[in-house]
Amino acid sequence: MPKKARRAITRSTSRTAAAQRRPSKSSAVLKALREDIVAANRILAHYGVLDAYGHVSARHPDNPEHFLISRSRAPELVTAADLMVLDKECNPVEGDARQPYLERFIHGEIYRTRPDVAAIVHSHAPAVIPFAASSVALRPIYHMAAFLGRGVPVFDIRNRFGPTDLLVRNHDHGRALAESLGESDVALMRGHGYVAVAPGVPLAVFRAIYTQLNALLQQQAIALGGSVTYLVPEEAVLAIPTHASTIMRPWELWKRKIGSGK
């Protein structure tokens, strides 16, 4: 074989080997998403939005009918190795035999119903619970929680299924919750907690955190005994875009707080 031809083959082989060593764009995106899910679990545990319970998920970037979520484990302990891929029926794929969260149907049915949602947080934060158990609606009291201005429906599982243990244990429960959520960013769950949804993990974390903070502030304002002034819908609409455009500022800070950012 002529030397020129051999050199061409060698160069081609080297390029192919180098390309195989480099992660594909898809695998790089998936790796970054997995890191974000782990960070989200740790951040929300750090700020008391999640404790031993609750969970975070993200829609799979390569298959929108699948989603990533940790195996059944306390959020503060979640690592990348704990993440599972579940299909649209909320079953583990690729023969993963580990125990998934019992309430994975919250995530699966919201993803099925809301194609705009790419990340979900389910929390039992105590400050939010009273607003699903009383006649006082959770409303945005400051600009950081403007997303609540889209409405905060209350899902009462008893109204659809009679007395239960209040957990979202199957597809029917999950579909009913997704229907209650509608086009809102947050839905409360009577006697249970809440869900916060967003088009990405950082913004879902933002909404979960500021839902709890707004609940605390609203209770403080009500306790003062006077009238409370809430954001009007027009103010909420004007404030919401700022959250998305500046989300990397708190996200970077939150990751540093838990030691996953430089």
Image (cartoon, grey):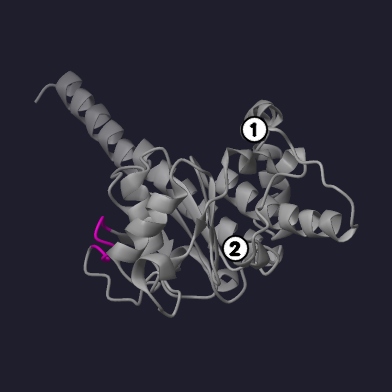
Q: Earlier in the sequence, mark 1 or mark 2?
A: 2
Which residue was labeled with disc 1?
A: 240
- For residue 155, which numbered disc appears in the image? none
Would you say the residues marked 1 and 2 are in contact, meaning their CB atoms lie under 8 Å apart? no
Q: Is any atom of residue 114 visible in this view?
A: yes
Across and down, in percent, residue 74 comes to 54, 75
Across and down, in percent, residue 155 comes to 48, 60
Question: Which three-letter amino acid code belongs to the residue tagged 2?
Answer: Ala
Q: Is residue 88 found inside the magenta-colored segment of the image?
A: yes
Q: CA distance from mark 1 to mark 2?
A: 23 Å
Tell me which residue sits at (23%, 34%) in the image: 13
Nearer the observer, 128 or 28:
128
Nearer the observer, 50 or 224:
224
Q: Is residue 25 found inside the magenta-colored segment of the image?
A: no
From this view, report whether residue 155 is shown above or below residue 18: below
- Magenta region's main secondary structure? loop
Q: How many marks?
A: 2
Nearer the observer, 55 or 24:
55
Which residue was labeled with disc 2?
A: 132
Label 2: how many residues lie within 10 Å, few (<14), some (14-19) or many (20+)?
A: many
Question: Which three-letter amino acid code belongs to the residue tagged 1?
Answer: Ile
Relative placement, left or right, of 231 versus 18 is: right
Residue span colored magenta: 87-93
Relative placement, left or right, of 77 versus 103 is: right
Tell me which residue sits at (62%, 40%) in the image: 147
* In front: label 1 or label 2: 2
Q: Secondary structure at mark 1?
A: helix
